[in-house]
Amino acid sequence: MKLSVAGKGGVGKTFIAATLARLLAREGYNVLAVDADSNINLASSLGISREAAEGIIPLSENSKLIEERTGFPPGSSYGVIFRMTPRVNDIVDR
């Protein structure tokens, strides 16, 4: 099952996403909750401490992984064509 929550700011997307993630996890589902919002609050909504959340490296800042998957380091590929659908099925394990 894959769910995506999107919409206007301030309408409760993070609350809904966190609630769904917690409820599904309680039902025994393996849940991956991804916060793609520029205002990162999902971790705190899930009850993850600030200290633990600070140890999470955003995918957008993982230069090594970006280069591995696209063939170019971030910022160097302007005007270069590269695959827009890199393999992502193992991201959680990394």
Image: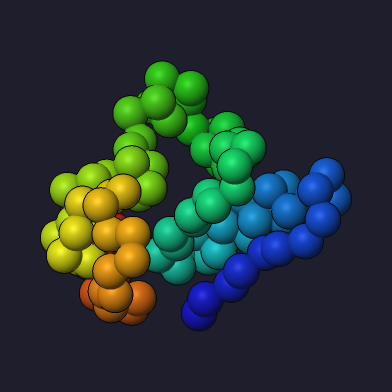
Would residue 93 be seen by someone viewing this image from the given angle? no
Residue at image position (22%, 66%) is 70
Left or right side of 39 for 53: left
Residue 36 percent location from the top left of the image:
54, 52
Residue at image position (82%, 56%) is 8
What colour scheme does the image use?
rainbow
Residue 88 sits in quarter:
bottom left
Residue nearest the observer in this picture, 72 or 92: 72
Residue lying furthest top: 51
Residue lying furthest front: 79
Would residue 4 be seen by someone viewing this image from the given angle? yes
Left or right side of 84 for 32: right
Tell me: residue 36, above or below residue 7. Answer: above
Give the total of numbered labels. 0
Residue nearest the observer in this picture, 93 or 9: 9
Residue 82 percent location from the top left of the image:
27, 74
Residue 57 sits in quarter:
top left
Residue nearest the observer in this picture, 22 or 44: 44
Residue nearest the observer in this picture, 77 or 23: 77
Tell me: residue 19, above or below residue 56. Answer: below
Residue 62 percent location from the top left of the image:
27, 45
Residue at image position (49%, 32%) is 48
Residue at image position (33%, 66%) is 79
Left or right side of 67 for 19: right
